[in-house]
Amino acid sequence: MQVPAILTSLALALGLACCGNALAQSTQIRPDPLAGQNPQADGTILEMAQAYKRTDRKRLAALLPLVRGHVLEPWAAYWEARARLEELGSADLQAFSARFPGSYQEDRLRNDWLLLLGQRRDWATFADEHARYRMNDDKEVRCYALLIDEVKNGANAAAGLADEVRRNWYAQRETDDGCALAAAQLLADRKLQPIDIWRKARLAIESNRPRMAGKAIEIVSPESLPLLNELNDSPTKFLTSKVIAISRTRKEMIMLGLIKMATGDADNAAAMLDAKWSTQLTAEERNWTWGVIGKQAAQKLSPSAGDYFARVTKDEDLTDDMLGWKVRTALRNGQWKQVASAVGAMSEEAQQDPTWVYWKARALQALAKSDLDRVEPNRLYQSIAGVRGFYEQLALEEIGQKVSVPPRPAALTPEEKAIASVNPGLVRALYAIQLGLRSEGNREWNYTTNLHDRGGMTDRELLAAADLACQREVWDRCINTSERTRSVIDFEQRFPMPHQQAVVQRSRSIDLDPSYVYGLIRQESRFITDARSGVGASGLMQVMPATARWTARKIGLTGFTPDQINDRDTNIAIGTGYLKLVLDDFAGSMPLAAAAYNAGPGRPRAWRNGPLLEAAIWAENVPFAETRDYVKKVLSNTTNYAAILSGQPQSLKARLGTIGPRDASVPDPSKDLP
C-alpha cells in the first residue's frame, strides 16, 4: 500500500510516538521519525478494520502483533479485544488499561464491558469498574449505576435518582436493558409511579417502536401484552370492535390505540376520541392524546392542528415535543397568546433553548401594551443575541444590531500550539482520519476535546486543537471544535473558506451569492471533498448521482461521468449549477431553495401552500426535523460568511423575507427539477 504523503508529514510534524507510556496523556512525547511511516503497517491497520467489521477474530489476533508500536495500535488492540468481549475478564481489561492508559480506546472498551456486566447482573465487578469510567455518555451504563445506588442505599440513594432514570429512559430511542431494569426497581420502590411507565409506552408507540412499548408494559401490566399486539396490528379494529371494561390499565391501552391511529390518520383518531372515548379518559389522558393528535396534524401542516391543540385543557400535561408543535401551529395562525403560554409550559431546560426564548420574546412583544410590558421581551432578546446561530442572529436584529465579524481572540502562542500538536488523542485522531478511518478518528477527537482531564478543554485549548485540525485541512474537526468555545469566537476557524477561488469565481459567474454557497457547503459536508451520505450524495456539495447527471446536461457540462462527482471543480460546478436552478425556481427565496436542496423541490412546493408567513415562521414549521435544522443553519452560515466576505454588517432578516403560495401568474421555470 502506498502511504499518503500527508501521513508521513503528519507523523514527522506531530512527533508520533511509539508505544507503552508514550501513549499516556502527556505532552512530553519523544518524537519518533519511524512511527507511522511503515506503509505495510498502515495497510495492516486497514485490514484489521475490515476484519473487525466481519468479526473475524482469528485474523485480528494474527495481525495484532504486526502493528506493535504503530500510532494506531490502540485501535487495533481495541478491535481485537472487542471481538472477543464476552470472553474477557477483569484482568484482561486491566492489562489493556495498563498498556493504553487514558486513551479513548481504553474507556471505549470499558464502556462495552460495563454494558456486558450489567446484562450479566455482575454488580460487584460493575461497581468496581464503573469508578474508572470516564466517558459517562452512555445512558444505559448510567442507568445500571443508578440502579446499584438504589438497591444499595434505598431511601438514602442520591437525590434526583428517579428523575434521572426517567429522563434517560425516555430519551432512549431503542430497547435497552439498563434503564428499563432501573425503572422497574424504582416502580417497586414506589419512587416511580405507574403513569411514568405508561408514558414511556406512549412515547414508544408514537415513534413506532412496539418492542420498546412492550418492554414498558411488561413492567407495569404484563397481562396487557396481547392487547398491545392487537392494537399495533390494527388500531381501528382494536378501538371499534373490542368491548373493553374500563380500568386504569385498559384506559392506557385505549390511549395507545388512539396514539397509534393518530400517527397514520390524526383526523380519524380525533373523531374516534370524540365519539367514543373522551368521557372515559382522565383529563391528563385526554390532554396527552389531543397533544399527540395535534402534533401529528401540525407535522402535516393541517389547518385542523390548531383546533386539536385547543382541546388541551392543561399544557403542562404535554411533552416538550408536543408543546413545540403547539407553538409552531400558533405561529402559523398568528396566535401570540398561545405561543407565550405553550413556551411557558415547557420544561426549564427547553425554555432555555434559543428557539423558544426568541419566540416567547416575540409573543410578549406582540402582546405588550405599555413600555413596562416590553422590558421582559427585551431582556429575553438580550439573553441570546449574538452571531452563534439562527435565533441568536434574529434576536440581535431585534435589539437594533446586525451580524458583524467579532474581534479575533488573542493569537495562539507557540506553546499552546505545541501542546495540542503532541496530544496523543488528537494525533491518533488525525492519523486515523487521514488514513481513511474517519469514524474512528472523529470519535477519538471528540472524546479528547470533550473529556480532556475530565473537565473538558478550556477555550484556549479548544482553539489550539481547532487550529491543529485547520492546519491539517480536517475542516469538520476544525469547525466543530471551534464552535464549542464559550467566551470567545474565532470566525476564521468557525467559518473557513477552503477552495475560495474556485467557489467564489464559479458562484459569481452564474450570479449566485458565494456566501450562500459557502453556507450550504459548510452544512452539507463541512468541506470534506470525499464526503458521502447514507443515501449516496457525494462530495463538497453532496450531490446525488441522478441529480448530477440531470444538472450536467442542464448546464452544458459535456462528457460527465458519475466517477467525476468527487472531483472538486466538477462537484462545485454541478452543485452551484443545481442550486442556481433551484433558487430561480423559487424566485430567489434562499430558505425555500435550501429546503429544496436538502429534501427535494417537491416538498417545499407543498410546504409553502398556506398563509403568507415570515420565512422564520415558515422554516420553524418545516415538518422534517433534519430539513428544518438545515434551512436555519444554512441561512445563519450565509449571513456570517457574507459578513466575512463583505467586511460589512449583515442582516439575516433581509435574506429570509416572506413565504407563501407561488404566484400563478409567474411561469414555473424548472418543473422537472429532480
Image (cartoon, rainbow, N blue to C red):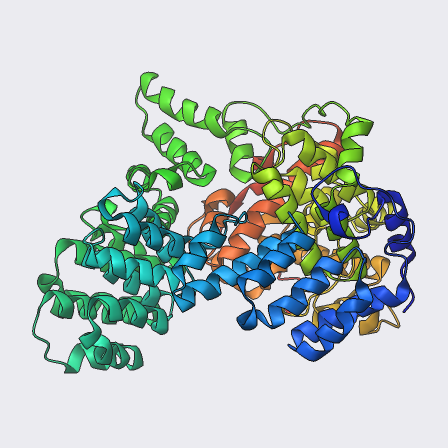
- The quarter of the picture where residue 579 lies is bottom right
Q: Nearer the viewer, residue 586 or 45?
A: 45
- The quarter of the picture where residue 233 lies is bottom left
Locate the N terminus by quadrant.
bottom right
Q: Which residue is drawn at the image coordinates 75% and 31% (left, top)?
A: 646
Q: Is residue 322 positioned above or below 62 on the image?
A: above
Give percent across and percent down for residue 492.
75, 34
Q: Which residue is drawn at the image coordinates 14% and 81% (left, top)?
A: 242
- The quarter of the picture where residue 483 lies is top right
Q: Is residue 587 positioned above or below 51 on the image?
A: above
Q: Nearer the viewer, residue 101 or 408?
A: 101
Give percent across and percent down for residue 276.
12, 70
Q: How many marks?
A: 0
Image check: 89 left or right of 194? Answer: right
Give percent across and percent down for residue 482.
67, 38
Q: Which residue is drawn at the image coordinates 67% and 72% (left, top)?
A: 52
Image check: 624 left or right of 521? Answer: left
